[in-house]
Amino acid sequence: MNIFYQPDIPKGAHHLDEDESRHAVKVLRMQVGDELCVTDGEGRFYKTGIISTDARKCSFEIRETAFQEPRKFRIKLAIAPTKNIDRMEWLVEKAVEIGIEEIHFMVCKNSERKNINRDRLVKIAVSAMKQSGQYYLPAIQDIKSFDEAVAVPADEKFICYVDNDNPNHLKSLAHPNRSYLVLIGPEGDFSADELKLALAKGFVKTSLGPTRLRTETAALVACQILNFVNL
């Protein structure tokens, strides 16, 4: 089943945007009367019927509406983007497929990249949401300072930090049905001052296992662990 995205349906927009319209009309060759499945990315799912096959503005009428309740837990990831942005694009795609509510990008002392193309990352998130059959689009936040990142609200806060005295694994620290914020540092890891600030802000230093992980791998492992905690 192909799922299309139109965030403005609740505002009365009963048509697809140009990219989605082109895909429906030119690629899938959908016709007037065909069923079109659409989500607004806020938990609503619409079964619609096509009434106009304009490749720039494919219009539809709503036949049936359903609502999916949000998850009882929320996963928020704050990560320093890698020098190779392709690795962040891969992370966004996979994290959305697995299940996540927010992705924040932050600049740390050891960061090699201090900017992102948020619009492109949102498009990747939309595609991953549709491909995985979900009705909630995770919030992809623009880049912020480390101080701003540690201020993001959550019930339980964790900082993944590599050292030899870190016996507490994330799976043993997280409790189900909470909101979580996990910090993942740059290739050079967090600085001592950043770790000190995070701990002062209520973060718990945590391990993701005995091996040293790449930035994007650590983020995905943390995301998966928190989803498992809530099974």
Image (cartoon, rainbow, N blue to C red):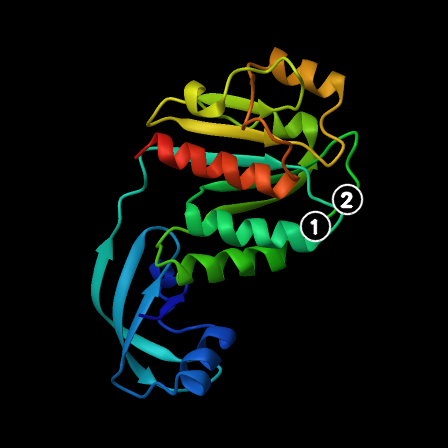
Residue 161 placement (x, y as % from top left) = 64, 23
Disc 1 residue type (three-letter): Ile
Residue 194 in the image: x percent, y percent? 71, 20
Residue in the picture at 32% in, 51% down:
43
* Image label count: 2
Percent coordinates x, y for residue 93 in the rendering:
52, 54
Asked which quadrant contains residue 41, the reply is bottom left
Q: Is residue 7 visible?
A: no
Residue lying furthest front: 210
- Please rate how many residues cluster around mark 1, counting C-alpha atoms within 10 Å: few if below 14, some from 14 to 19, many from 20: some
Q: Is residue 146 above or below residue 197?
A: below
Residue 31 against residue 14 in the figure, above or below: below
**Placement of the N terminus among the 4 image quadrants:** bottom left
Q: Residue at x 50, y 51 (%)?
A: 94
Residue that carries the numbered disc 2 in the rendered image: 113
Q: Which residue is mark 1?
A: 116
Q: Compared with residue 192, is residue 103 higher up or lower down, i.e. above or below?
A: below
The quarter of the picture where the C terminus appears is top left
Q: Secondary structure at mark 2?
A: loop
Q: Comparing marks 2 and 1, which lies closer to the viewer?
A: 2
Circle 2: is it few (<14), some (14-19), or many (20+) Cα within 10 Å? some
Is mark 2 in CB contact (under 8 Å) with mark 1?
Answer: yes
Which of 72/195 is in front? 195
